[in-house]
Amino acid sequence: MSAEDWQKIEGGIIAATALVIAFMAGAGWPWWMWLVVLALPDLSMAGYLLGPRRGAALYNLFHLYAVGMVLVLLGMMTGQVGLITLGLLWLAHVGGDRGFGFGLKQQSGFGDTHLGPIGRGSEKGRDHGQG
């Protein structure tokens, strides 16, 4: 297996684990709030309005596991279950992205990631001897 495959497996495990723990934490939010919070990291795509270099930097910042971990830690330090849940859902989002092969962005364009190309015409799989 390639390093990219291992990162996808790791991402899937992190996503599943974070979701289970988030449900166990029980923030008491309505179901729609879970969906909103899960989508929050993708607001960073707006950075691409400033160009590919800044867009990639902002997207990558918001798609680090560390952001979710810091939110969980802050929530634990302050006793705020909602902040813990926010961090866990952030981790679930990032892990899910990695699990599906959506990696950190390269400055060359949104479709170029550290896990390989994504999107239409990406020839995903062929680049790694899988096609």
Image (cartoon, rainbow, N blue to C red):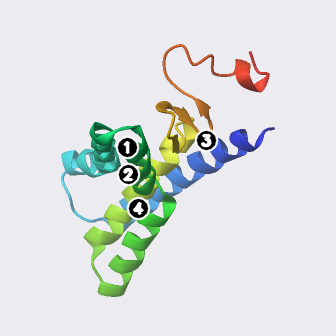
Q: What residue is pinned by disc 2?
A: 58
Task: For the residues labelled 3 and 2, say whether their Cβ atoms are less than 8 Å apart.
Answer: no
- The reply to whether dot 3 and dot 4 touch (C-beta < 8 Å) is no
Q: Nearer the viewer, mark 2 or mark 4?
A: 2
Residue 82 vertical position relative to residue 47 in the rendered view, above or below: below
**Three-letter amino acid code at the position of disc 2:** Leu
Q: Position of residue 41 (x, y in %)?
A: 34, 50
Q: Amino acid at mark 3?
A: His
Sequence-earlier tag: 2 or 4:
2
Tell me the distance, in whole angstroms, between the alpha carbons under discs 2 and 4.
20 Å
* Whole-percent x, y for residue 92 in the image: 45, 52
Mark 3, residues whose alpha carbon is within 10 Å: few (<14), some, or many (≥20)?
few
- The quarter holding residue 99 reads top right
Using residue 19 as the reference point, say whether residue 32 is left or right of it: left
- Name the residue that disc number 3 marks: 114
Q: Label 1 crowding class (10 Å Cα cut-off): few <14, some 14-19, many 20+? A: many
Gap in Å between the C-alphas at discs 1 and 4?
24 Å
Q: Secondary structure at mark 2?
A: helix
Query: How far apart, in angstroms, are the residues tagged by discs 1 and 2?
Result: 5 Å
User: In this figure, which residue is indicated by the disc labeled 4?
Assistant: 88
Label 3 vs label 4, nearer the camera: 3
Looking at this view, is 47 or 30 the one in front? 47
Q: Quadrant of the C terminus?
A: top right
The kind of secondary structure element at disc 1 is helix
Residue at image x 48%, y 57%? 64
Pinpoint residue 14: horizontal percent, then vertical percent.
55, 54
- SS state under label 3: loop
